[in-house]
Image (cartoon, grey):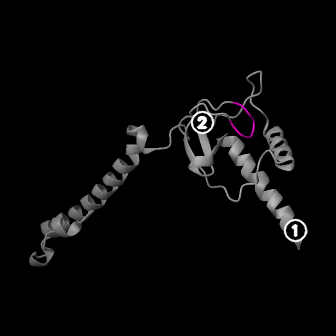
Amino acid sequence: MDRSAATPSWCRFDFTNPVVARSRALYDQNLILLEESYRRIALGHRLLNKAWGVEGAVDDGVQPPTNGNGAPWPPYEVICLVRDKITSGRLYMLPDAQCWIGPATGKVCVVCGVRIFGGAECEVGKPDSAVFAHLVCHSLWCQESRAQHREQDAAAS
């Protein structure tokens, strides 16, 4: 907030007067409260207007991939799947964890092969050659990619 326009010229007041001193203290407190209000309003915009936030993030919870019976896959099974796909060349090692996250659009997860419904989906790669993954699958894909990069670096040295 630009205080220069709203700040009165305090130098012309006599601060030995207790009413003026109290007024100045209350004015300063009100400025602090006003700035805090502006901050809370800005933070609240995400809750009021879903377009300003990541849909399906913390509010909706993480939607893990499921097996054929509808039960969620245990993380260790997804890690084994990622490791096997990287080893066979069906999945590449991620150079970093960068991705675009948005609301699920029903694309098929490149890691587990299950459609992404509900929650968030991660778009990895360039827009013309992007692949999609569940948030959990992407996280485990990044973890396994980092582990394999470390193994390659250790083997090279």
Disc 2 crowd, CA 10 A, few/some/many (<14, 14-19, 20+): few
Residue type of the residue flagged with mark 1: Ala
Q: Can you give x and y, in whole percent of width and height, for residue 79 in the image?
A: 81, 44
Question: Which residue in the protein does label 2 denote?
Answer: 61
Q: Residue furthest front?
A: 128
Seen in the image, is 54 located left or right of residue 81?
A: left
Asked which quadrant contains residue 119, the reply is: top right
Asked which quadrant contains residue 12, the reply is: bottom left
Question: Which residue in the protein does label 1 denote?
Answer: 154
Position of 70 relative to 56 (above/below): above
Q: Which residues are magenta?
A: 109-114
Image quarter (top left, top right, bottom left or bottom right) of the C terminus: bottom right
Give the label on residue 47, or none: none
Image quarter (top left, top right, bottom left or bottom right) of the N terminus: bottom left
Helix, strand or loop under label 1: helix
Identity of the residue drawn at 75% across and 25% down? 71
